[in-house]
Image (tube, rainbow, N blue to C red):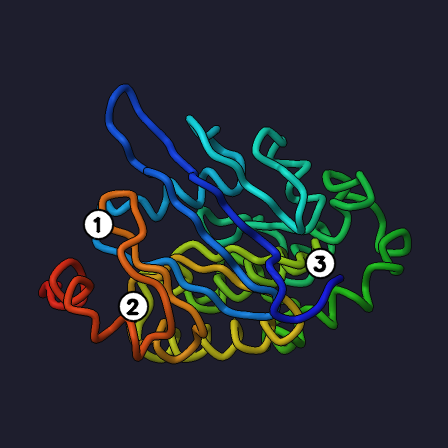
Amino acid sequence: MGAVGELVLETRGLTKDFRGFVAVGGVDLKVRRGTIHALIGPNGAGKTTVFNLLTKFIQPSSGAILYRGRDITRSRPADVARQGMVRSFQVSAVFPNLTVLENVRVALQRPLGTSFHFWKSDRSLQGLHGRALELLEQVDLATHRDTVAVELPYGRKRALELATTLALDPELLLLDEPTQGMGHEDVGRVVELIRKVAAQRTVLMVEHNLSVVADLCQTITVLQRGTILAEGPYAQVSTDPRVLEAYIGVPE
């Protein structure tokens, strides 16, 4: 899996041009193994475009993306996911009319190539049962195992989405606005879940809540107009005059 601290993800001159509008321009991003790394910036800074480029939903105009030292610039999204880089939280990946446990068992079937066989008998899925319960324990949903997903409160539903993502056993987990739309109690719960699951993997997250970033992340990359404005620990970037002007000092 590699040593803690070595580069797990790197971009070199990553650029995306939409008919003359440069959404991302020459981004050199370095994500080190075993860290929680945040990508922040004002609206329109290019954060979502960078995530879409990394997970191959769109192709770059120029530049390169390296994952574990391999060039994945032209790889397909499914191939990138199979290699261990998985994105979560951009849309709900939950089946609303299945129970919490059933949702995780369906997710566990994906690597087996049987992800749509959720009508199989319980006996045929017993091999996945133990692992599904372990994942529910990880995200504090074991007591909700028989709850139908649509009945979960919003924060618990996001926890279930995290469990279904962890079922793919990602080495690098990309979280897209994991606390968006949450109340204070749910934010605190999700922060602790991220901290727990990050103990065994690397996390790159786009996050608007700066208190979450300060609490969780070892490295923060600040984007402005598609380029890197500043990078470093929160104590450093939060006092950078350029960052204060571009982002932190702007009233929400």
Along the viewing direction, whichever of 153 and 68 lies nearer the viewer: 68
Q: Height in image: 211 above or below 44?
A: below
Measure the alpha-carbon separation of dots 3 and 2.
Answer: 26 Å
Query: Nearer the N terminus, badge 3 or badge 2?
Result: 3
Q: Which residue is mark 3?
A: 169
Q: Which residue is pictured at 52% across the width and 55% down the height?
A: 174
The three-letter amino acid code for the residue at tag 3 is Asp
Q: Are marks 3 and 2 in contact (CB under 8 Å)?
A: no
Q: Secondary structure at mark 1?
A: loop
Q: Which residue is mark 1?
A: 43
- Mark 2 residue crowding within 10 angstroms, few (<14) / some (14–19) / many (20+): some
Closer to us: mark 1 or mark 3?
A: 1
Q: Quadrant of residue 200?
A: bottom right
Q: Secondary structure at mark 2?
A: loop
Q: Relative to 111, is 198 on the left or the right? A: left
Quarter of the N terminus within the rendering: bottom right
Q: Which residue is pictured at 60% across the width and 72% down the height?
A: 197
Q: Which residue is pictured at 80% across the width and 39% down the height?
A: 113
The three-letter amino acid code for the residue at tag 1 is Asn
Q: Quadrant of residue 8?
A: bottom right
Q: Relative to 166, is 150 on the left or the right? A: left
Measure the alpha-carbon separation of dots 1 and 2.
Answer: 13 Å
Q: Are marks 1 and 2 in contact (CB under 8 Å)?
A: no
Q: Secondary structure at mark 3?
A: loop
Q: Quadrant of residue 46?
A: top left
The three-letter amino acid code for the residue at tag 2 is Asn
